[in-house]
Image (cartoon, rainbow, N blue to C red):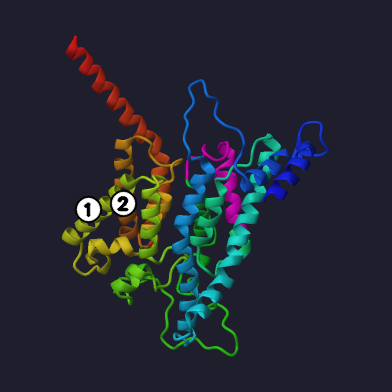
Amino acid sequence: MKKLREYLDKIKPNFEEGGKHPGLKSTFEAFESFLFVPNTVTPSKGAHIRDSVDLKRTITVVIIALLPALFFGMWNVGNMHYAAFGHPDEGFFSKFFYGLGQVLPIIVVSYVSGLFLEFLFAQVRKEQVNEGFLATGLLIPMIVPVDVPLWMVAIATMFAVLIGKEVFGGTGMNIVNPALLARAFLFFAYPSKMSGDKVWIAGLENPSETEKIVDGFSGATPLADLAANATPRYSVSDMFFGTIPGAIGETSTLCILIGAAILIFTNIASWKIMLSAVIGALLMGGIYNVFGSNTDVYMQLPCWEHLILGGFAFGVVFMATDPVTSAQTETGKWIYGFMIGVMALLVRVINPAFPEGVMLAILLMNVFAPLIDHMVIQANIKRRLKRAEAIK
C-alpha cells in the first residue's frame, strides 16, 4: 500500500490546475479517496460538525448490511432454477455459482451505467464524485427479477441517476429513492418483464433443448397467488427463509433482518421508521381481517404474514430508511413509517394491478416527507409560543 500511495502522490499533480489533465481531477480524487482516507480534516475552530462517520463509511455499512440478502438471493436463484428443471437436489455450491453467474452481470451493468453518469456530472460540475451510488448500484439489481434484460437495467439505472438525482443537484438533494425510481420505471415501461410467472426464475422463458420444465411447476410468487385470490403454495417458513420466487434480494426475511440489525446497531438507519411501518402494516392488515370479505383470500391473510411477503421487509429496512428521502424529525419518522405500512397494504390488497404495494407507498411518502417534517416543526413552534405566553 505504501508503494501505491507513493505512486498516487507522484501522478497527482497531473490532475491539478496547471497539470496535464485538470479536467479529470474529480475522477482521480474519486479513486484516491476510495483507496485511502482523505488527509483533510475539519478545522479546529468554527461551527463544524465533527463525527468519525463520513459518507463513505456510511455507504460501506449499508453495503455490508445488504450482503446477507444478496448472497442468499444468488443461492436462491440457482435453487429455483434447478427446482424448475427437475434437479432440486443439486449441491449448495452448484446453486450458488449458477446464481452468481446470473446476478453478477446485472450488478456490473448497474454500476457501469450509473457510475458513468455520476463521473460525467462530477466532471461537468467540477465537483468530487459522490459515493452515494455505491449503495444504489447494488440496491437496483437486488429489487429486479433475475431474468430482466441487461439493457433494461442500464436504461432504468441511468434514468434513476439522471431524473432521480442529478436534476435535483446530486446525492443528498434527491426527493425520491433512486433505486425505487429505477424499479418503478421498469414496472411501468416494461410491465411484462416485471410481472408474471416466468420472470422470477432464471431460464424459464428460454429453456434449452435438453432440459424440460417440471410439469406443474409455477414461478408465480406468493403475492401473485394472492392477487389471483388463491392460497399461496408456499409455507410460512419458506416465505420467511426465502426459498420462494421473487426479486433477487427480497425473498429472505431472515437475511433482511440481519441487515436491519447491522443498520440499527451502527445508527445508520432509523429503527423508528422500521417499527412504525410494521405497526401501520399490522393495523391495516388487521382491519382487512376484521372487516374484509370472507371470500377474499388476500383480505383474510393473517396480518403478520404480510410482513414476510414480497418486498415489504426489504423496502422498509433499506428503502424507507434512506436518510435523504425519509422524514428527518423524530415525530415525523413515526408518521412517515406508519403511513408507508398503511399505504403498502392498501395498494397491495385493494388494487390487484399492483400486488407489490411497498414500492409505490415509499415513493409516495418520499414526496410527502418534507411536508410531514414541516408540519411537525410548525406544531413545535406553536407549542413553544403558547408555553412562552403562558409564562408571561
Q: What stretch is highlighted in magenta?
A: 154-176
Between 53 and 281, the residue placed more toward the observer is 53
Assign a secondary structure to mark 1. Answer: helix
Q: Residue at x 29, y 71 (%)?
A: 236
Looking at this view, name the residue that lies furthest to the bottom. 210
Residue 351 at x, y = what percent? 34, 59
Q: How crowded is mark 1: few (under 14 residues within 10 Å), some or many (20 or more)?
A: some
x, y percent for residue 100: 55, 71
Residue receiving disc 2: 341
Q: Where is residue 56 in the image (x, y as percent from the top left)?
A: 54, 44
**Who is closer to the viewer here, 305 or 8?**
8
State if disc 1 and disc 2 touch (CB < 8 Å).
Answer: yes
Work out whether 44 lies above or below 63: above
Q: Is residue 6 magenta?
A: no
As drawn, is 386 to the left or to the right of 155? left
The amino acid at mark 2 is Gly
Q: Residue 111 carries which label?
A: none
Q: Where does residue 321 sit, x and y in percent of width and height?
A: 40, 47
The residue at 33%/76% (across/down) is 234
Note whether residue 180 is visible. Answer: no
Q: Determine the image quadrant of residue 350.
A: bottom left
The Cα atoms of the two marked residues, 2 and 1, are separated by 9 Å
Q: Name the residue under label 1.
A: 283
The residue shown at (51%, 50%) is 60
Residue at the top extreme of this rendering:
392
* Predominant SS of the magenta segment: helix
